[in-house]
Amino acid sequence: MPRLNSGDISLHYQVQGEGDPLVLIHGLGANMAFWYMGIARVLAARFKVITYDLRGHGRSSMPPNGYNLPGMAGDLNRLLNHLHIDKAHVVGHSFGARVAMHFSLRAPDRVASLVVADTQASCLQSQVRLRDWPHWKTWKKQLNTMGFHALPPEDELITFEMLKYFNELSADFSHGALNQDKPAGHRPSLKKRDMGRKGSARWDRLMAATTAQRDFSDDSQITDYRVQAMSTPTLAMFGELSHCLASCETLERYVDNCEVTILPEVGHFHPAVKPRLFTQKLIRFLDRHAIGIEDTPVRKLPHRPPERRVVAKGPASYPMGDRFGNPVIFDRRTHAETSERRNSANGQLVHFPFRDRYGIHVCFDRRRAARPAEITDNRPRQETARSHTGVRLRNARRRLGR
C-alpha cells in the first residue's frame, strides 16, 4: 500500500473508489482496518474513500512526539495535499472524531461536512465514572454471569484502556446487549480489527516510548467557544448505550448546523458492530451535502411584478380584442356563464370561453377567430371593428335587461 513520507512521519494510507473525497479516521488503538469490510468497501462504490493509519498506529511510523491534536491534524492536511484534494468529507470515530473536529476548526474551507462518531471532549462533557454509566449495572451483571469477576472499581473514570479491557473480556461488550444467541465465532469482535491482543504490544510501546499518553489526553484546542462558531455541516452519530451521549447533546446545542443520529442497541464501537446501519445513515447525510452543491451560484430570475387581477363589483361589459385583432366582449360579473352568448350575424350559438391574462373567462366568435381574413366589408377595418363592437354592446345590454 502507498505511503506518505513527510518530515518525521511516514503515513500508511489507502485510496479506493471514485467520487467526492471521503476521509475516514479511526480511534486510539485501532488502524485503518477498523473501516474495512462493511464500511469502506460499501462507501467506495459512491465516494473516493481515503483511509490511513494515525501516527503510531498500524503501519504508520512511530515518531517520539506529535500525538496531540495539532500534530494529528497536520498529518491529515499533508495527506490531502499529497493527494491533491482541496475539499473532502471527514468522518472520525472516538479519538479520530476529535482529530476531525480540530481539523474542521483549523481549516473549515477544506471540510465539506463533518461526521462525529461517538467521541468525548472536555468542553462537551466531563469525564464519566463507571458507576455513573446508566448501562453499567446491566453489563456488570451479564459479565459476572459469563464468569468475569475481575472488574475495575466503580469509581474509576471510563478511559480508552478500560473499554479496550472490556472488549478483550467479551466480544459482545461493544454490542451493548451481550447477545448470547449468536455463537462466539459470529459475534462482532474488535479483536479481529487489531484492537485486542494483537495490537497490545505496539500500544504498550507507543505509551512507553513516545509522548502519546500525555498528548492523547490534551484536547485544550477544542473549546466551547470555537465549537459554537462552527459552520460546517455536522452529523453527530452516537450509540444508544454509549457513555458519550452527553457530548452528543452538547454538540447539538452548540452547533447550529448539526444533525443527530442515535443508533439503537449499540455502544461506543457502533461503526464496527452495526456497519450497515452506520453506512446507511452516513450516506444519507453525505448526499445532502455533496461537494459543489453549496458552491454553485444560484441563478436569480429577473423581477416580475405580480399579475394584476381585476375583480368587478357590478355588471359591466367592455370591448376587447382577441389574438387576431377582432373585438371581443366579456362580462366580468357573469364570466362563468357561457350559455347565452350568440353570434350577432345569424344568432347561432358559437361562443367559446377562454381566459385572458388576468384569469378571466372571455367569449369570442370561433368562426371569426379561426378565419380572421374573411371580413369582406369594404369599410376600413377599424370602422368595421367599431360597428361590430356596437352590435356586441347592444346585444350584451339586451341580455342584461338594460
Image (cartoon, grey):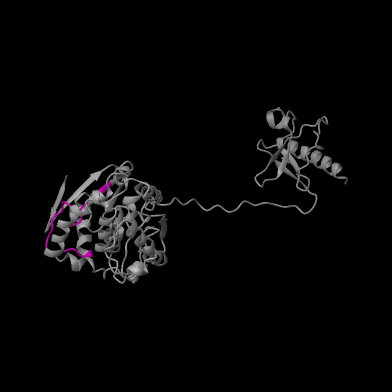
Residue drawn 27% across the image and 66% down it: 152
Residue drawn 80% across the image and 50% down it: 315
Instruction: Answer left or right for 10 relative to 339.
Output: left
The relative height of residue 146 versus residue 134 in the rendered view (above or below) is above
Q: Is residue 61 magenta?
A: yes
Q: How many marks?
A: 0
The magenta stretch is 49-69
Question: Where residue 386 sits in the image (x, y, percent)?
Answer: 76, 40
Q: Is residue 70 magenta?
A: no
Q: Decide which of 163, 152 is in the foreground and name it.
A: 152
Question: Where residue 17 sits in the image (x, y, percent)?
Answer: 28, 42
Instruction: Answer left or right for 207 relative to 288.
Output: left
Question: Where residue 302 sits in the image (x, y, percent)?
Answer: 50, 51
Residue drawn 78% across the image and 38% down it: 338
The relative height of residue 25 versus residue 323 in the rendered view (above or below) is below
Q: Decide which of 327, 301 is in the foreground and name it.
A: 301
